[in-house]
Image: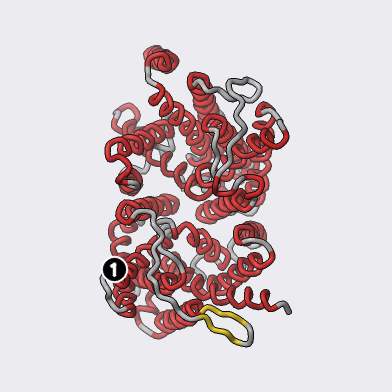
Amino acid sequence: MDIYLLEAIINGILLGGVLALLALGLNLIFGVIDVVWIAYADIVMCGMYVIYFLYAQYGVPLPLACLIAIVAMAAFGVLVHLLIIAPVLNSPPINQLLATGGLLFFLQSFATLLFGTDFRNIGVRLPILEIATLYISFSRLIAFVVGLVGAIALYLFLKRTYIGTAIRAIAQDREIVGLMGVDQRRIYLVTSAIGGALAGLAACLLALQYDVHPFIGNTFGPVIFMICVLGGLGNMIGGFIASFIISQIIAIGGYYSNIELSYVLAFTFFIVLMFFRPRGIFAR
Amino acid sequence: MSLSRMSMLVGLAILIALPAVVPPYFLHLLIQILLWAFIYTAWALMGRFGFVSFGHGAFMGVGAYVPALLWNYYDVTPWIGIPVGIALSILLAIIIGYPCFRLRVVGHYFALVTLALSQVVLLSLTAARDITGGSLGFTPRAVGHSWYALQFPDKAYFYAISVVLWLIGLYVWRRIDLGINREALEAISEDEDAAAAVGINVLREKLRVTIISAALTALGGAIYGQYFMYLNPETVSGIAVSLQIVFAVIAGGVYSLLGPTVGSLLTLSLTEGLRVWFGTNFIGAANTIYGILLILCIIFMPQGIVGALQGLRPRRSQTKVAPAE
């Protein structure tokens, strides 16, 4: 097999790890609260700015900066829920979608207002691994491994802890759970915090690979929604698998043509598949 | 009735007389407001029945690029190019709409499928940079004042065109509002199964309104391109434009005739006002305020500004529009 193709495939798998992490956060929120956070990718953008300013401007050590970013984004998730989602919880779903869309507008333009449209890089240069004439970026490898670990940790949390069980129960039937003595509002807050923290974690991983700018959310936001819908909104395992399918299409498509066309291919694949499996690939 | 007809005529007379008195800068603003109002009204044709499309950037992009490309490369007059662009948009609407409506892709799923569509058009336009100029944009070949090329350096011509377009948009909205289809569409937006059970052809009704909406959006995009004489994938297509359309309409009011127009007036004057006020030091200030307003609108008055104002009038308070599902 062509060595460059192999490299593209490996890069695709590594990209899939970060996408899976993001899709996981979005799916968790959708499955539990039943709201699509259109602005999810822009919360990642905020996290990346937090890391940039703490690490590159104020000299905070990188691991600490990452930790602060994760905690800050968790708090931000709670704030988003309290200020924007809670008031429209009983509105038609499309209004909820639009309310978080307003947040998207706000975050992107507020970031432009504060930081301008410059591309900023945190300036960490990680080595490039060379394994038998294959070149693999170390930062992507880290992103993949951490993404995977994050996904497994979330899985264990949902399976093994009381709150995790309550979260899964709410996703299954939100009426009965109330009768079982679970406080819905608390679960919603915990879920929003976890969703925000996952966005913060993804921000740490993406900050190693990409420049931060106010509109970075637009570059991978639509891809994450596509992955979630493809895997079935709220279906976490489906979203996990779908992120690797989509990242492979993007990577291999990029190998044969250019990057825009590979995204066109991915979106077209998504649209066509929607017609065969309107509730996602893994819908029962 | 006669009073409202009178005020309508007076308003129209003022609109027609405006180019004679206002300076070119304001005329430029007015043209933009009317063109966007037309596109917003086209979107509202679907949006008011709960078919929230994030794909109108795709229709606008096709409508704007096809006539410009045909003109530059094949010397085809926009009088043919624009209908071709509209036809392609309709085709796109059918390709997406038919399977979606057939297979009951609704709500979130419909919004996200159409979002993917507008990304496909945006990225295709960017990827075909040898032909379209990619993200650097595309400039139709200018020939000066010409009816054949539909290019007029004098703004008064485009002002007249956009007034006519805007009136066409309002007329179509009104026709659908008063027609029997509206009842059918409202029934569909409430409950598709029940609507089908009482004999409504759900697929046909949804497809028809989608095609009308897509065609008008493409026409709006084409005139937008002819007026600005510069096209950029980001400004006529993609997620940003689609979201802009959705939010301006929601802010103005999706359930009322003049709601989209108010949305257009509001957003454009806000953007321009803040730009003039702050200068270019505060890029993004307008959209920041805009974003906050949108969130507040959705939370406190989901019927939009016009809807909320109508709700204040006691006579109309009985006919409060049910929010679409």
The vertical placement of A225 against A237, above or below, is above
Q: What element carries label 1?
A: helix
The quarter in which the N terminus of chain B is drawn is: top left
| Up-down relation of residue B30 to residue A66 (above or below) | above
Q: Position of residue A5 (x, y in %)?
A: 68, 74
Chain to which mark 1 belongs? A
Q: Relative to residue B192, is residue A162 depicted above or below?
A: below
- Mark 1 neighbour density, 10 Å: few (under 14) some (14–19) many (20 or more): few
Residue B324 in sight from this viewpoint: yes
At x 52%, y 35%, the residue is: B42
Q: Is residue B153 toward the left or the right of residue A69 in the image?
A: right
- Residue A263 % position (x, y): 60, 60
Q: Which of B49 and B62 is in front in this view?
A: B62
- In the drawing, does residue A229 fall left or right of residue A36? right
Q: Which of B186 and A51 is in front in this view?
A: A51
Please determine whether, in this image, residue B322 is positioned above or below residue B7: below
Name the kind of residue labelled 1 in the image: Gln
Residue at the image position 41 percent from the left and 60 percent from the top = A119
Residue plotted at (53% across, 62% down): A223
> Residue A165: where, in percent of width, then height?
39, 79
Residue B61 place in picture, x, y as percent: 58, 42
Q: Can residue A172 be seen in this view?
A: no
Nearest the eye: B174 or A54: A54
Tag 1 residue: A57
